[in-house]
Image (cartoon, rainbow, N blue to C red):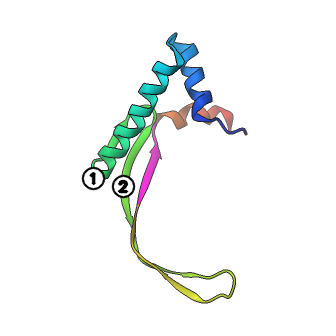
């Protein structure tokens, strides 16, 4: 498995839809920015065929310091959550 950068993704999309890379990059960046803004407002963002974006609250918990084993309180925090939807069905054949 390899890692695909956003630049490589922009290049692939550019080739597929026959647009300039800077145009695709602008759309790609706007897409990511809008998803982040909507999620930050508490909205669940649904992207059919890709997945759902939302913000969840992670509960306060007790962790361990790996250096000395002492208990450490980890406070409640907000975290982004992404759940794959339709795209995962395309990978069933690869299993």
Q: Residues within 10 Å of mark 2 (few under 14, many from 20)?
A: some
The label shown at residue 92 is none
Could you tell me residue 13's position as x and y percent? 54, 20
Could you tell me residue 89's position as x and y percent? 53, 34
The residue where tag 2 is placed is 55
User: Does the magenta run of residues contain 82?
Assistant: yes
Residue at left offset 64%, top offset 35%? 4
Could you tell me residue 32's position as x and y percent? 42, 38
Residue at left offset 45%, top offset 29%? 28
Which picture quadrant has residue 67? Answer: bottom right
**Rendered view: 84 above or below 72:** above
The residue where tag 1 is placed is 42
Sequence order check, earlier mark of 2 and 1:
1
C-beta proximity under 8 Å, tags 2 and 1: yes
**Rendered view: 30 above or below 57:** above
Prevalent SS, magenta region: strand
Could you tell me residue 8's position as x and y percent? 62, 28
Magenta span of residues: 79-85
């Amino acid at each position: 498995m390899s890692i695909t950068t956003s630049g490589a993704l922009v290049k692939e999309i550019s080739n597929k839809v026959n647009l300039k890379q800077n145009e695709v990059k602008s759309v790609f960046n706007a897409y990511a920015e809008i998803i982040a803004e909507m999620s930050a407002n508490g909205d669940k963002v649904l992207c059919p065929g890709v997945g759902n974006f939302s913000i969840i609250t992670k509960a306060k918990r007790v962790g361990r310091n790996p250096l000395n084993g002492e208990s450490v309180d980890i406070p409640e925090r907000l975290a982004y959550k992404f759940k794959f939807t339709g795209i995962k069905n395309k990978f069933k054949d690869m299993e």
